[in-house]
Amino acid sequence: MNTIELKDITFGYSNEKNVFKGLNFVLKEGEKVGIIGPNGSGKTTLLHLIVGILKPVRGEVKIFDKIRKDEKDFKEVREKIGLVFQNPDDQLFSLTVAEDIAFGPLNLGRPRDEIYKIIKDTLAALGLHGFEDRVTYRLSEGEKKLVAIGTVLSMKPQVLLLDEPTTDLDERNRERIIDIIKGLSASYIITSHDMDLLQKTTNTIYRLKDSKLNVISI
């Protein structure tokens, strides 16, 4: 089954040439995909089109076997597909780590007596036991990245989209995030400049260039 299907996508930012013209992409259920490409090739744009942050000028976005066009369609998508932003400060806006982790499940209507267990289990999986009351903006960059991943994992998504998850991290935190990604059972797409990361965590790697996604032999 195709979980995500983009057909003949054209997209461009105002006053700029098209980022995509005729882009096609398919993610099948269970796939773990990496996308590499130069700056400006559209890696982040691709992820934002999948969750409806951006809308194509032309083409079809089909997710979970349903064509998605308006905000109502994409609200359902965001309940099942989690996006981890490249910059964790774009994702973390609560005072404490526990509040950030709880935000998504609360919005999904999870009962409050279940939320505490979700927070505890998520932080344990990230190696952040005892971080519940830590002030988010005082965390290190690596800790913020981990918490940002946690805000998505706490919603138990069917698909994860990870945008440059190891950028600007030291080797210790980079390896921690690689281990976490390798342990995920959900399908995912990782965009990155880090070929070593993609080789360790994905089954298929595409190079994105000139609106084309070509499989790289590794």
Image (cartoon, rainbow, N blue to C red):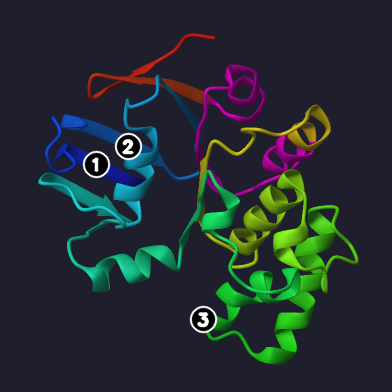
User: Where in the figure is residue 214, as x and y percent of width and height?
Assistant: 34, 17
User: Where in the figure is residue 118, as x and y percent of width and height?
Assistant: 73, 73
- The kind of secondary structure element at disc 2 is strand
Of residues 46 and 63, which is closer to you in this image? 46
Q: Which region shows up in magenta?
A: 176-203
Residue at 55% x, 59% y is 91
Identify the amino acid type marked 1: Leu
Relative to 50, 139 lies left or right:
right
- The kind of secondary structure element at disc 1 is strand
Structural crowding at the residue carrying mark 2, measured as other residues with C-alpha within 10 Å and reported as few (<14), some (14–19) or many (≥20): some
In this view, the mark in front (2 or 3):
3
Relative to 124, 87 lies left or right:
left
- Please say whether residue 1 is visible from this viewpoint: no
Task: Tell which residue pokes out farthest to the right in this image.
Answer: 130
Q: How far is disc 2 from disc 3 in space, using C-alphas?
A: 29 Å
User: Where in the figure is residue 186, as x and y percent of width and height?
Assistant: 58, 50
The disc, 2 or 3, on the residue closer to the chain's N-terminal end is 2
Residue at 51% x, 81% y is 107
Q: Label 2 belongs to which residue?
A: 26
Q: Label 1 belongs to which residue?
A: 6
Residue 64 against residue 116 in the figure, above or below: above
User: Where in the figure is residue 142, as x and y percent of width and height?
Assistant: 74, 44
Q: Are marks 1 and 3 in contact (CB under 8 Å)?
A: no
- Picture disc at residue 119: none
Q: Label 3 belongs to which residue?
A: 107
Q: Are marks 2 and 3 in contact (CB under 8 Å)?
A: no
Q: Are marks 1 and 2 in contact (CB under 8 Å)?
A: yes
Of residues 147 and 188, which is closer to you in this image? 147
Identify the amino acid type marked 2: Val
